[in-house]
Amino acid sequence: MTIHNTLLAALFACSLAPLAQAQTATPQPGDPQRWYQADSTPQAQLRTLHKEIAAALAEAKKACRLQASAARAACLKDAQDIYRQDMANAEKLRLAAHPRQ
């Protein structure tokens, strides 16, 4: 695994952490209550996962832009590849996060 893939995998893992934590986190003042309510249907879970995958791509692109120009193109390509893979496997990821549904 290249450094780019390691960075992108870490960014993806960090972006999904709030999904797992949202059900157990204590609401903070000013936070909307909906942030602390679990998605009740598989469709809602998948919509949320798609948003998280897109946010992970945005974070990865942001990190890629900070790299030297020689490595930037490869980093952006890796980020896009991971995005495509994650979107293609979104249902499997959803089932892994919510095995009962």
Image (cartoon, grey):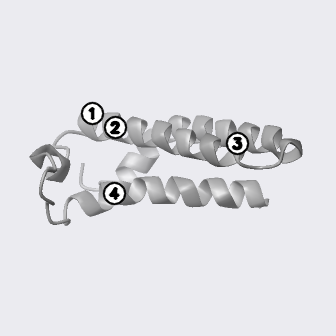
Please identify the quarter of the rendering in which residue 42 is found: top left
From mark 4 to mark 2, how far is it between C-alphas? 15 Å
Residue type at tag 2: Leu
Is there a contact, CB below 8 Å, between mark 4 and mark 2?
Answer: no
Residue found 66% across the figure and 58% down from its top = 7
Residue beneath label 3, please? 65
Query: Residue 26, how many percent across, how many down?
Result: 15, 66
Residue type at tag 4: Pro
Secondary structure of the residue carrying numbered label 1: helix
Q: Is residue 52 left or right of residue 76?
A: left
From mark 1 to mark 4, how far is it between C-alphas? 18 Å
Quadrant occupied by the N terminus? bottom right
Secondary structure of the residue carrying numbered label 2: helix
- Give whichever of 41, 79 is nearer the camera: 79
Residue beneath label 2, please? 46
Give the answer, above or below, for where 50 lies relative to 60: above
Residue beneath label 4, please? 18
Please identify the quarter of the rendering in which residue 2 is found: bottom right
Residue type at tag 1: Gln
Q: Is residue 82 left or right of residue 94?
A: right
Secondary structure of the residue carrying numbered label 3: helix
Give the answer, above or below, for where 35 lies relative to 42: below
